[in-house]
Amino acid sequence: MAAEPRERVAGTLHEYVEFWAAGEQGKGEYRCSECAYGVTVYRTLPVCPRCSGSSWEPSAWSPFGRALRLQ
C-alpha cells in the first residue's frame, strides 16, 4: 500500500498535486518533480537517477494516452 503523501500543492478548487518522497512505498508510474524523469515502481520510490531529486508525483495515466499520441 502507498503511504500518505507528504506535501500537497493547491491548484484549483478541486485539484492538487501529490508529492511522494524517495524511500516511500509506491506502486505505479511516477515522474520526478524536478526533471520529469519517469519511473515505474512496485515497492519503494528511488532517488532520481537523472538529477538526484527526491520528490515524485504520480503520472497522469490514460488507457488510450499512447494511442492518441500516435495519431
Image: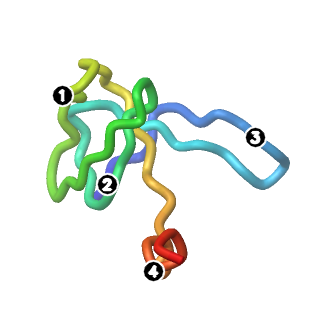
Q: What is the crowding at mark 3: few (fewer than 14 residues within 10 Å), some, or many (at least 20)?
A: few
Label 4, secondary structure: give it: loop
Q: Quadrant of the N terminus?
A: bottom left
Q: Nearer the viewer, residue 37 or 25?
A: 37
Across and down, in percent, residue 25 comes to 23, 47
14 sits left or right of 61 in the view = right
Name the residue carrying label 3: 11
Amino acid at dot 3:
Gly
First in sequence: mark 4 vs mark 1? 1
Name the mark nearer the viewer: 1 or 3: 1
Mark closer to the chain start, 1 or 3:
3
Residue 69: horizontal and vertical position, in percent?
51, 69
- Determine the residue located farthest toward the top in the rendered image: 52
Measured in 3D between alpha carbons, the distance from the residue under mark 1 to the one under mark 3, in whole angstroms, is 28 Å
**Mark 2: which amino acid?**
Ala
Relative to the observer, which residue lies in front, 61 or 7? 61
- Marks 4 and 2 sit apart, C-alpha to C-alpha, by 22 Å
Q: CA distance from mark 2 to mark 3?
A: 22 Å
Contact? badges 2 and 1 (CB < 8 Å): no
The disc placed on residue 2 is 2
The residues bearing labels 4 and 1 have C-alpha atoms spaced at a distance of: 27 Å
**Separation (CA) of disc 2 from disc 1:** 21 Å
Residue of label 1: 49
In this rendering, which labeled residue sits more in front, label 4 or label 2? 4
Badges 3 and 4: C-beta atoms under 8 Å apart?
no
Q: Earlier in the sequence, mark 4 or mark 2?
A: 2
Q: Badge 4 is on which residue?
A: 63
Q: Quadrant of residue 44?
A: top left
Q: Which labelled disc corresponds to residue 14?
A: none
